[in-house]
Amino acid sequence: MNGWINAPATLRALGLAAGVFCTGAVHADLLNVKFSADAPGPYAGYSGAAVIGSAGDYWNVWDAPSGSFQLSNSAGTAGLQSLSFSAQGTWSLSPGGSGFWNTAYQDLMNSFIYTQSNPITLLFGGLNAGDRYSLYLYQQSDFNSGSYGSSTTVGNQNKTAIYSNLDSFLENVNYQEFTGIVDSSGHLAVTLNIAAGQSQAMLNGLQLKTESTQAVPEPNTLAVLGMGLLILGGVRRRPIAIFRTI
């Protein structure tokens, strides 16, 4: 049987093929922050993973109960993102005080900012509006020294964590995860209140992962579109008919 394939149909097919090769992420970024202290336990920085991340990842370290600073990403590259925060104080546990002691995460989980009264507040700035985010908040201390827990609000989300002295990560016990979309201001606000019936809330550190949701063409897409433009140029000069024998 004989048939004909016209140029418009060919172009439509090329357009469909181009769409298949689109990717959904323009960029992704991971910001890590550890809150440290000089006393009474030893000061320690940190590098590596927590619930997410990879070995050797860079962490921004801050050893005061409040402040504001520019952030570097997990590769150690400085960016436009910033963090402002306020707490009542800082504390560092003596060796062996945390269940994470002698694990890969001991230097992350041995110190924290804390409050026994007003909320701990954090405000990220310089984020890309519309980006999807995943926020991980690490919260553990020496459970034997008191009853600790936090009621945390991020955007319109609220979660409670009642801490326990573990040696591994357990969601809503020694870390909390929040997901959402960065608002039009490029800010993300976090508030940690003391949970009902508890005496203290604290924050050892955090990770903020952001990624774009905009679609962009991959190189294969551009090649297909280029072929389409060449064919379109031929169509403008003269009709194209392609004979097919089946």
Image (spheres, helix red, strand yellow):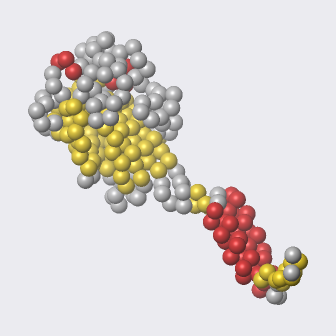
Query: Where's the N terminus, which quadrant?
Result: bottom right
Residue at image position (41%, 58%) is 130
Q: Is residue 180 above or below residue 32?
A: below
Determine the residue located farthest toward the top in the rendered image.
Answer: 95
User: Percent from the top left, x then y, of residue 60?
Assistant: 40, 33
- Quadrant assignment, res 203: top left
Establish if 214 lies above or below 238: above
**Farthest front residue?**
1
> Which corner quadrant of the image does residue 221 belong to?
bottom right
Would you say 90 lies left or right of 126 here? left
Give the vertical position of 200 relative to 135 (above or below): above
Q: Nearer the viewer, residue 12 or 212?
A: 12
Q: Residue furthest bottom?
A: 238
Q: x, y (%) of residue 213?
A: 48, 57
User: Residue drawn 24% across and 15% down?
Assistant: 40
Is 231 situated left or right of 139 in this image?
right
Quick one: quadrant of the C terminus? bottom right
Front residue of 172 and 47: 172
Q: Identify whether 38 is placed above or below 192.
A: above
Q: Position of residue 36 (x, y in %)?
A: 31, 25
User: Which residue occupies 25% across, 53% down?
Assistant: 156
Residue 177 at least partly seen: yes
Which residue is found at the position 30% from the left and 18% from the top?
98
- Horizontal placement of 236 versus 243: left or right? left
Residue 86: percent from left, percent from top: 22, 38
Q: Is residue 2 left or right of residue 155?
A: right
Q: How many marks?
A: 0
Of residue 34 and residue 52, the one placed in the foreground of this image is 52
**Which of the 4 image quarters holds residue 235?**
bottom right
- Is residue 107 at least partly visible in the picture? no
